[in-house]
Image (cartoon, rainbow, N blue to C red):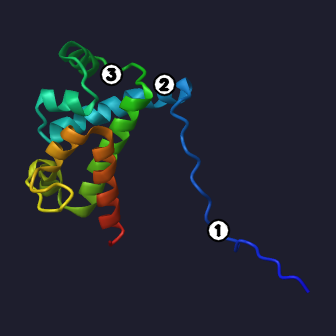
Amino acid sequence: MSLAYAYPKSHFEPTVLVDLTAKSERERLSKSALKGFFKLAAAWKLRDDDARELLGGLSSSAYYEWKKNPDRVLDVDRITRVSYLLGIYKALHILYGDKLADEWVTLPNSNQIFAGRTPLAHMLRGGLLAMQTVRKLLDARRGGL
């Protein structure tokens, strides 16, 4: 008699990932992503220089043009950055009241990830990977870890 092993059945259906390499997906998401980013930047009271750096080092002229007219197609790097930042924003508003949620990124943080710096300074210094780390930290906190 042989034993047959099978993965247990589940009602869980994995989320279909968005293919950001597909221009049609970036076209669909870019305008709302930029609008969300500029609202986030206002809520966090980001300096324009910091907002530009979070977007991957955007020039001043391009930043103000994007702010005035967000109807454009972002590249994969920029839309990924905005996605992480919006996820961070959402997680903070789930974890904390609005005031603390919007101040959190600019407050010194004793978590070893930040080494006493602000989460914003950490993200500015570490770029996309630092944004991913902050997002994972907050998602873990949301999950009770």
Look at mark 3 in the image and give the residue it sits on.
70
Look at mark 2 in the image and give the residue it sits on.
27
Assess disc 1: are there few (<14), some (14-19) or many (≥20) residues with their C-alpha within 10 Å of its C-alpha.
few
* Image height of 61 relative to 42, above or below: above
- Secondary structure under tag 1 reads loop
Lower sequence index among marks 3 and 2: 2
Q: Quadrant of the C terminus?
A: bottom left
Q: Quadrant of residue 5?
A: bottom right
Find residue 102 and report its horizontal and vertical position in percent: 16, 49
Q: Amino acid at mark 2?
A: Glu
Q: Amino acid at mark 1?
A: His
Q: Residue drawn 48% across and 28% down?
A: 26
Look at mark 1 in the image and give the residue it sits on.
11
Residue at the extreme bottom = 1
Q: Quadrant of the N terminus?
A: bottom right
Front residue of this view, candidates 29 and 6? 6
Lower sequence index among marks 1 and 2: 1
Assess disc 3: are there few (<14), some (14-19) or many (≥20) residues with their C-alpha within 10 Å of its C-alpha.
some
CA separation in Å, label 1 and label 3? 39 Å
Q: Amino acid at mark 3?
A: Pro
CA separation in Å, label 3 and label 2? 11 Å
* Image height of 64 relative to 132, above or below: above
Find residue 16 and report its horizontal and vertical position in percent: 59, 48
CB atoms at circles 1 and 2 under 8 Å apart? no
